[in-house]
């Protein structure tokens, strides 16, 4: 059952977020059976039939285990490369109109799960640092849904 808040809320469109360890371009993906989807312990890799795999951080984030890259390289010869940097193309963005901390409510959910890429001015006003690796862990824990990867 959905709440009335969800019924009247503006629907957020999600950006296409490609997997980490992309060697060249996600469009070189062979659109295989999606071995990368099956090996992801976090359950964040999805693939529509005949489509390119993508990340969805609704329930969790990427821990950079490299399993997706290893299975891709073994099975389909290299869209993903496990030797690449632990980074996803993108950056976390905080919607300050929805963020509890910007409303002067003490909430450190994003900072608690982040590996130092989000800093606060005292207890409020979180800021995403430039070297954010876009892991998406902060997206899934935000109680307001105020964080997205762009």
Image (cartoon, rainbow, N blue to C red):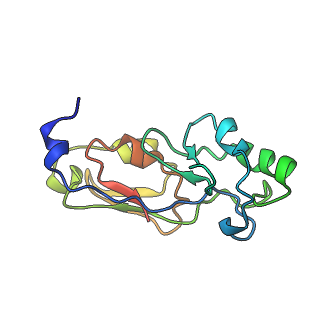
Split into 4 quadrants, where in the image is the N terminus? top left
Query: Residue 141, percent across and down?
Result: 38, 41
Q: Is residue 57 above or below residue 43?
A: below
User: Which quadrant of the view contains residue 127?
Assistant: bottom left
Query: How many discs appear?
Result: 0
Which residue is at a point 56% across and 37% down the rendered structure image? 43
User: Which quadrant of the view contains residue 87?
Assistant: bottom right
Which residue is at a point 30% across and 48% down the rendered structure image? 145
Of residues 134 and 112, the one drawn nearer to the viewer in this rendering: 134
Split into 4 quadrants, where in the image is the C terminus? bottom left
Which residue is at a point 69% across and 45% down the rendered structure image? 34
Which residue is at a point 25% across and 46% down the rendered structure image? 144
Query: Residue 60, percent across and down?
Result: 48, 40
Of residues 34 and 134, the one drawn nearer to the viewer in this rendering: 34
Of residues 87 and 130, the one drawn nearer to the viewer in this rendering: 87
Q: Residue furthest top?
A: 1
Q: Is residue 120 above or below residue 112?
A: below
Of residues 132 and 95, the one drawn nearer to the viewer in this rendering: 95
Query: Residue 18, percent across and down?
Result: 59, 60
Q: Residue furthest front?
A: 50
Query: Residue 9, percent across and down?
Result: 17, 51
Q: Is residue 71 above or below residue 89?
A: above
């Amino acid at each position: 059952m959905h709440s009335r808040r969800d019924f009247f809320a503006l629907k957020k469109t999600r950006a296409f977020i490609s997997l980490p360890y992309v060697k060249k371009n996600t469009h070189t993906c062979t659109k295989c059976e999606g071995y990368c989807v099956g090996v992801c312990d976090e359950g964040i890799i999805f693939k529509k039939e005949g489509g390119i795999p993508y990340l969805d951080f609704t329930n969790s984030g990427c821990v950079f285990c490299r399993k997706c890259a290893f299975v891709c390289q073994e099975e389909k010869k290299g869209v993903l490369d496990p030797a690449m940097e632990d980074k996803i193309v993108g950056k976390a963005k905080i919607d300050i109109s929805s963020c509890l901390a910007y409303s002067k409510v003490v909430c450190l959910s994003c900072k608690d799960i982040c590996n130092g890429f989000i800093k606060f001015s005292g207890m409020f006003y979180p800021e995403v640092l430039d070297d954010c690796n876009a892991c998406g862990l902060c997206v899934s824990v935000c109680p307001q849904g105020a964080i997205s990867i762009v």
